[in-house]
């Protein structure tokens, strides 16, 4: 009998560290949660459940809230108050404020210099750290896996479980490794990489799995880009996406508000270095891609996996569903999508609402004009992003080009706050979902990188961003 | 909210053959502004049922179907993908559904459904094809024996999370179960840095 401990993946290591009770055939594991993030849409019913049962929040110090989905992005009214799209959205935000107050949870609200889309805000504050378990009533919680955390979305009933016990009942998912070899070409971004992975896996291809992203192309991404990649893991159906932390991660986190300090920091980094898959770790599934074969991507149907090169032609669907999808988009099989008339461009969301994303868009827009038939919204992912962008003058670039510079929030990503497209309008969006009606009833969404979205705004049609970007000369 | 027990269900199917029916279809985001979990049945598949002017669509797949007689929803592959909103199973349950059948059901939706008395049943492609081809078929789902049967035609077993099954069969409340682990949680926290 071998005494050699079996090789472990990054996911195994984080999972095991948080087991309060192991999984048995009769019951799921009881998993301890380090960080619980809360927003206004998926929490009210959970707080109600606590109140009905007379329960407290078990670990308010591990729980942080912000408001982002229903909040307006337009300037405050003359009374100095936010101008909500409806009484319902206002009541929802009010409910979060009341609940946080009643249960002693820190809320990054209207008065906070740190308010923002929850998955943009938490990493900025160092609330997201390697090796943590992080949950939120929101499927894009996968974003935080970029730091080597195990982070996944939960339903509202589970939100109440975590509030009440700081634990979750979970069956251990399977593991998958997605290795991306080589380097991305100039003009190709992490968003294009994410769309290429999803196109390869299909929208249900990751179901039941936690994905670890590996390979040179992943290692060479900055932190913001890693977040973009992990963010869209759910669009392949997977629970979570993870990237082993490294010097890039530690450098980004150093001195963030909630990150450990001084000796604590050194100790933490030492521990975090162990957070990588052992060389002989075995995954339930493995796939690989070549980075150099990835081009700027765009979606051509109402599902994020229906993605192709922006300069390609739409495939001919082999079934009714595919045909309906193309019909909905108003696209024709076997034709380019470049040249399709664009009505709205949205830059923002927890996928692409960070400083680097805004820089990418500004680089295309500088000295150019948004096409007269296009309405363009640029929505920073957080107050921190907004301040940093304004310090660089990016807002002036956007406004000079004719785009609207807004307050932080989810905005047109989910179209709950009044920012939405009209029926039939074609939106080029840097967000993560293009389902029918996601950005407004009857609205048609194509997903792209910030550069592709900005290029399309200028051109008035879906456009390849590469000619718009002064790229360094590569032989 | 405590769950109604679920042992056995016999009902007609309602078939929505589209693949990748995401939670934005099941309940569009503009209905998420609620702070209650009640009364969301009216929003279920809203944009499939009503047009821009709020008038019923001719293509409404639910038109003329008594929800009480059609408690089993058969969806195309990869049902319930997209957002984690529990409003989706709340809306379906409020509409009257007690089970969802597909070849593949998205993880978070599956977990949310179980917590709201909707049984997610994954079947093989052949069984699925038969169900898609026969809308309104009389189907029996037996949670005790983990069997799904098209009355008098075929019978199949299915898999489901053992704990989720127990919760539904015995009316075990998962939160109460977790609270029962208070001692282990306290021990874990005591030695957790
Ligand atoms: S930006 Fe979009 S995906 Fe991200 S949290 Fe907000 S609504 Fe969800």
Image (spheres, rainbow, N blue to C red):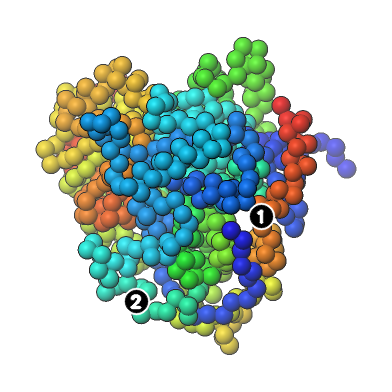
The chain letter under disc 1 is B
Residue at 41% in and 52% down:
B34
Asked where in the image residue A437 lies, by quadrant, the reply is bottom left
Q: Nearer the viewer, mark 2 or mark 1?
A: 1
| Residue B37 on image: x %, y % | 48, 57
* Numbered disc 1: secondary structure: helix
Determine whether the residue tagged by mark 2 lies in a helix, strand or loop: loop
Which residue is labeled 1 in the image? B174
| Farthest residue, direction bottom | B152
Q: Is residue B10 visible?
A: yes
Query: What chain letter is assigned to the residue under label 2?
Result: B
Query: Who's the residue at 44% across and 46% down the image?
Result: A41
Depth check: A47 or B77 in front? Answer: A47
For the residues labelled 2 and 1, say whether their Cβ atoms are less than 8 Å apart.
no
- Report the side of A417 relative to B143 (left or right): left
**Residue A469 placement (x, y as % from top left):** 25, 27
Q: Earlier in the sequence, mark 2 or mark 1?
A: 2
Residue A318 seen: no
Residue occupying image coordinates x 69% and y 72%:
B144
The residue nearer to you, when weighing A234 against A123, is A123
The residue that mark 2 highlights is: B63
């Amino acid at each position: 009998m071998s005494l050699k401990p079996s090789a472990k993946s990054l996911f195994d290591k984080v999972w095991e560290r948080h087991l309060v009770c192991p999984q048995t055939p009769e019951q799921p594991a009881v998993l301890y949660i380090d960080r619980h993030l809360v927003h206004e849409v998926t929490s009210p019913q959970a707080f109600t459940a606590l109140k009905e049962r007379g329960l407290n929040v078990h670990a308010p110090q591990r729980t942080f809230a912000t408001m982002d989905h229903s909040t307006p992005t337009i300037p405050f009214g003359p009374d100095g108050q936010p101008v909500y799209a409806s009484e319902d959205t206002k009541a929802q935000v009010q409910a979060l404020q009341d609940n946080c107050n009643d249960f002693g949870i820190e809320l990054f609200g209207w008065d906070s210099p740190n308010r923002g889309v929850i998955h943009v805000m938490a990493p900025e504050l160092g609330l997201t750290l390697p090796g943590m378990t992080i949950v939120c009533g929101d499927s894009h919680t996968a974003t935080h896996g970029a730091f080597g955390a195990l982070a996944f979305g939960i339903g509202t009933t589970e939100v109440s479980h975590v509030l009440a016990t700081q634990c979750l009942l979970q069956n251990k998912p399977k593991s998958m490794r997605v290795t991306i070899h080589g380097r991305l070409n100039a003009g190709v971004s992490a968003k294009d990489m994410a769309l290429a992975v999803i196109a390869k896996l299909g929208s249900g291809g990751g179901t039941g799995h936690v994905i670890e992203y590996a390979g040179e192309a992943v290692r060479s991404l900055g932190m913001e880009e890693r977040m973009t990649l992990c963010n869209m893991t759910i669009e392949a159906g997977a629970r979570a996406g993870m990237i082993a932390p490294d010097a890039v991660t530690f450098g980004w986190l150093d001195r963030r508000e909630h990150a450990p300090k001084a000796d604590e920091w050194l100790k933490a980094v030492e521990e975090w270095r162990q957070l990588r898959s052992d060389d002989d770790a075995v995954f339930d599934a493995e796939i690989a891609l070549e980075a150099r074969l990835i081009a700027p991507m765009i979606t051509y149907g109402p599902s994020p996996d229906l993605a192709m090169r922006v300069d390609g032609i739409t495939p001919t669907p082999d079934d009714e569903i595919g045909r309906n999808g193309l019909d909905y988009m108003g696209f024709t099989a076997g034709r380019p999508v470049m040249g399709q008339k664009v009505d709205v461009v949205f830059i923002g969301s927890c996928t692409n609402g960070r400083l680097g994303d805004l820089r990418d868009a500004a680089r295309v827009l500088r000295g150019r004009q948004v096409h007269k038939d296009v309405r363009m919204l640029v929505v920073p992912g957080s107050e921190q992003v907004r301040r940093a962008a304004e310090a660089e003058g990016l807002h002036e670039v956007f406004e000079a080009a004719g785009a609207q510079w807004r307050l932080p929030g989810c905005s047109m990503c989910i179209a709950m706050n009044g920012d939405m497209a009209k029926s039939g309008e074609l939106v080029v969006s840097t967000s993560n979902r293009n389902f029918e009606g996601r950005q407004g009833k009857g609205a048609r969404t194509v997903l792209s990188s910030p550069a592709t979205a900005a290029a399309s705004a200028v051109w008035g049609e879906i456009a390849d961003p590469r000619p718009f970007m002064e790229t360094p000369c590569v032989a | 909210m405590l769950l109604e027990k679920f042992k056995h269900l016999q009902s007609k199917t309602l078939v929505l053959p589209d693949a990748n029916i995401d939670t934005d279809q099941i309940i569009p985001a503009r209905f998420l502004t609620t702070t209650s979990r009640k009364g969301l049945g009216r929003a279920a598949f809203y944009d499939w049922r009503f047009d821009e002017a709020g008038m019923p669509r001719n293509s409404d797949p639910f038109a003329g179907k008594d929800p009480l007689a059609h408690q089993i929803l058969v969806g195309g592959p990869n049902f319930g993908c997209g957002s984690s909103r529990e409003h989706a199973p709340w809306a379906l349950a409020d509409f009257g559904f007690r089970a969802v059948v597909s070849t593949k059901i998205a993880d978070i939706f599956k977990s949310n459904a179980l917590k709201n008395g909707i049984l997610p049943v994954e079947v093989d492609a052949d069984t699925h094809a038969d169900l898609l081809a026969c809308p309104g078929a009389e189907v029996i789902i037996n949670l005790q024996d983990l069997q799904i049967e098209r009355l008098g035609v075929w019978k199949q077993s299915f898999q489901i999370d053992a704990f989720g099954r127990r919760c539904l069969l015995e009316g075990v409340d998962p939160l109460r179960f977790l609270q029962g682990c208070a001692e282990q949680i306290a021990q874990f926290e005591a030695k957790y840095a």
